[in-house]
Structure formats: structure tokens, C-alpha cells
Amino acid sequence: MTFQNELINWYQINKRDLPWRHTKDAYIIWLSEIILQQTRVEQGLPYFNKFLENFPTVTDFASASETQVLKLWQGLGYYSRGRNMHATAQIVVNHYDGIFPNLHDDLLKLKGIGEYTAAAISSFSSGEARAVVDGNVFRVLARYFGINTPINSPAGKKEFFALANELLYVEDPALYNQAIMEFGAIQCKPKSPNCIICPLNQSCFAFNNALVNELPVKIRKAEQKHRFLNYFVCLNGDDILVRQRQAGDIWQHLYDFPSIETEAEVDWNSLAFVSNVKTAFGEKANFTHLLSKKHILTHQIIHLRFFVLKNYIFNFSKQKELNWVSLGKLDELPQPKVIHDFITECLLNNME
DNA sequence: AACACGGGGTT
DNA sequence: AACCCAGTGTT
């Protein structure tokens, strides 16, 4: 049997039942594909259901505010996906008459849709013959064909895309694309795959040469950086001072609190010597340390310290990203997970 | 070509 | 701790 037929055969026996596999609606497939970028199916599934429920059509999506979209996205990470989806929904409504494109070249022009996602939506929705190349496909091809070109190098991408398109089962691109990705996710797993039961092991280069654990090859990325964020939680009656984060750093357009970043962990006495604190909050500002937390991102280890100050009035009208909101409406704002955890697990319990 | 961008699961 | 996940956009 051919490589393609083996994969499809395996898929029809072993596939999971996932909601986005029951439709050819480009809008619904787009929702699932963006949510699943760098995200496991189990983590993305509840978000997919939530988005489809809140925005049954692309027109509903476009009518929402970016804040509403980011609130639904809260906790999923890579928030540019949410911002780009919002922009794309409005482009589809304004330039495609609300009909979501299902052809590769149209899709590629939209925000947040790259080569992988354009191939996925077009093949699943219109049956266009475009091979998907995601992390699963890189791994299956590298192992089966014994390719040691680094998958995250430009040469590797070129090589794997060319091979993937040669292999594409043109009689049913959608079925084949689903099959190879599912095979990579479930059978040809990153760590300790059960090659003994694999239907492709007889012809698999990596299995026959004991290279399963060496392939695919990936270039190592930069080390994690430590960052020290000192947050100032300012309260005035039932109001709390929030900041909407701006471009150029993590958590763009999400809400947290005014903060000062330091080079190392500092206590309040040391922090008070930082001139910015007194400039921003006044000589008499007397914060008390409430909590320290550590939060791990892919490229950063963030050390957070929360200082709270009750009953102190500031005038921050000069800084448009700062706003007072009532505690009752605080949870309507999209927040980074670590901030949301701090608010619900710590701050609200200390409001007496 | 290299890096930034979240959060969670597995080994 | 290291690696990876239905990757994309920017520099």
C-alpha cells in the first residue's frame, strides 16, 4: 500500500471525533485553525465552542469589540491571534460581503493566516490541493523519509513544503491532510511513540535506523530571560486603577496595573528609591506588599510583585492607557492569566 | 535569518 | 528542565 493510503487507512480507524471535522464552512474551520495554532486540541476545544456560541457567523464576530474578543480569548495565549481574527472578520464583512474566502490565495492575504492555515482552510473547505505542513507533518516526514534538515530553518521549510506537496493525495486533499496531522499527533508522537504497532514501520527510515528519537532536527532557540515586574494596585473606594498594555511587549491590549520593571527582585524600600515611583505616585505613597508570583512564558520567566495602596487618589489623566474602573466591572476586561489569577485568588479576598 | 509572542501538557 | 503544541508577523 502507498504511504498515502496507509495514512488514510490508519486515520479512518483511529481518528478522534472533533466538531470542526463535520463542516466545510470556511468560517467555522477558520475559527478552529486559528485557535489550534501552537495549541493542543484539548486546550483549544472549549475555546472553539465558546467562540462559535458567541459568534455564530463572521458578521457576529466583526460586530464585537476587540475587548470582547480578547476577553473570550483570555487564558489561551498568543493574543495576536485574537486581535488578528477581529481584524480579519471585519475585512471579510467589508470586502467579501461576509462570505468567508475558501481559496488559498485569498486566505493568505488575511491577517493571522499564513501558509499552514491557508492550506488547511482551503483544502478542508473547498477541496483545493494544498498540503498542510504543521509540527505533526514535519515530524512524520522527517522520520519516515529520514530528513535531518532542521525544520525551523528556511532551507528545511522549503524542503518539507516541496515534499509535502509532492506527496499530497490529490484525489482527496482534505482527507489526506487530516490523516497525516492526526497520525503525527496520535501515533508518530514527539516522545516515545509506539513504533511496534505503527502500520508504516516497515518502510520508516527512522525506525529502521534507530533514529526515531533524533528526528526531526530543530535548531535550539534563545534562553529564557528573567523579568521583574513590580505592580502597583491602586484602590479608591470601589474603584481600581488599570492599565491597557500597549504594543511592543507581551500581552498587547490586555489589562493589568501600572508597574515598574527592575533588573532584579527588589523590596518596597529599594523600589521607593526608584525615582519613577515617587514621580508617579507622590512622596507619601505608602504601598504594602501583598503577594509575589512567578509566571513562565516560552521566552520569559516573569517574577511579579504586587504592592497595594488603598484610599489614595491620583490624577493620571495624562496617561490615556490608565483608567479607573469599578471592581464590579474589572472582570469584564481581558487580563493576562497571571493577573487574572492574582485578582481572583488574592486581591478580592483582601478587600475588607 | 532570527526573534517575539502564552499557556499548558509530557517526559 | 527541556521540549512541544493543527504558526504568524516583524525586524
Image: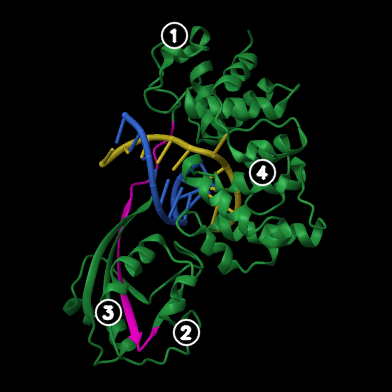
Chain colours: A green, B blue, C yellow
Q: Earlier in the sequence, mark 4 or mark 1?
A: 4
Q: Earlier in the sequence, mark 4 or mark 2?
A: 4
Q: Earlier in the sequence, mark 3 or mark 4?
A: 4
- The residue singled out by tag 2 in the image is A319
- The residue singled out by tag 1 in the image is A208
CA gap, disc 2 and disc 3: 20 Å
The answer to whether marks 2 and 1 sit on the same chain is yes
Q: Residue at x 68, y 57 (%)?
A: A88
| Circle 4 chain | A
Q: Position of residue A343 (x, y in %)?
A: 34, 69
Residue A83: numbered disc: none
Q: Residue at x 70, y 52 (%)?
A: A110
Q: Is residue A310 visible?
A: yes
Q: Earlier in the sequence, mark 2 or mark 3?
A: 3
Query: Are the residues at dot 1 and dot 3 in contact (C-beta closer than 8 Å)?
Result: no
Q: Is residue A26 magenta?
A: no
- The residue singled out by tag 3 in the image is A308
Q: Is residue A221 magenta?
A: yes
Relative depth, front residue between A285 and A248: A285
Instruction: Please give the range of residues in magenta.
Output: A218-239
CA gap, disc 1 and disc 3: 61 Å
Quarter containing the N terminus of chain A: top right
| Circle 2 chain | A
- The residue singled out by tag 4 in the image is A29
Q: Nearer the viewer, mark 2 or mark 3?
A: 3
